[in-house]
Image (spheres, helix red, strand yellow):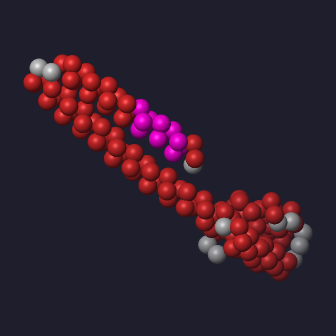
Amino acid sequence: METFDAALYLDIYGALLTDKQAEILGSYYNEDYSLSEIAKGLNISRQAAHDAIRIGTLALREYEGKLGLVRAHREALREAEEAGEALRDLRAAIAEVQNIALGGNAVAGGNAAAGGNAVAAGRLDAAADRIEKLINKEV
């Protein structure tokens, strides 16, 4: 298991481990302690530290396999990024519509129509703001 994955699994599932396992795995994955440093700090053998890491890491993998919280979190982040891209596209389209509608009507002398288009563009912009708030709230 890569260190990043193990650290993420530990953040999510660490409370399900024994206190000693969580401490040892935290020292190993989050603080980058060696087996010798862990063993010395906890007054255990290097082999005991190794075994605790091996068993604890297996437990973390099993929790992820059964619960899938890390997978779901990563999927939510991916979807939020896609929604953010769609939002950026929407904002660009709104700006384009405002430029075309307001510029075209002003040239033709249609100030009332231009005002109506500005209100419609304002509504689109407000909708984009609400979408952005929802995206940020969910992540």
Question: Hey, which residue is sitting farthest left in the picture?
Answer: 108
Residue found at x 71% / y 59%: 11
The answer to whether residue 53 is visible is no
Name the spot of residue 25 as percent of width and height, x first. Answer: 76, 67
Give the residue displayed 71% in from the left and 67% down from the top.
67
Left or right: 132, with 59 as reference point: left
The one nearer the camera, 68 or 14, is 68
- Relative vertical location of residue 92 with respect to residue 82 in this rendering, above or below: above
From the viewer's perspective, is residue 113 above or below residue 35? above
* Residue 8 appears left or right of 104: right
Q: Quadrant of the N terminus?
A: bottom right
Q: Quadrant of residue 16?
A: bottom right
Horizontal side of residue 88 vs 75, given as left or right: left
Write the residue at 37% across / 30% down: 123
- Would you identify the image quadrant in which residue 22 lies? bottom right
User: Up-down: is 38 above or below 121?
Assistant: below
x and y, in percent, of residue 81 in the image: 46, 53
> Magenta includes 19?
no
Q: In this view of the protein, which residue sits in the foreground, 91 or 106?
A: 106
Quarter location, residue 21: bottom right
On screen, residue 75 above or below 136: below
Q: Could you tell me how many numbered marks the image carries?
A: 0
User: How far from the left and from the top, in percent, is residue 38?
Assistant: 80, 68
Prevalent SS, magenta region: helix
- In depth, the one of 43 and 119 nearer the eye is 119
Highlighted magenta segment, given as a residue range: 126-136
Q: Nearer the viewer, residue 29 or 113?
A: 113
- Residue 86 horizontal/vertical position (percent): 38, 50
Q: Residue at x 48, y 36 (%)?
A: 130
Is residue 56 visible from the viewing direction of this image?
yes
Q: Going by the picture, which residue comes out furthest to the right?
A: 43
- 127 falls in the magenta region: yes
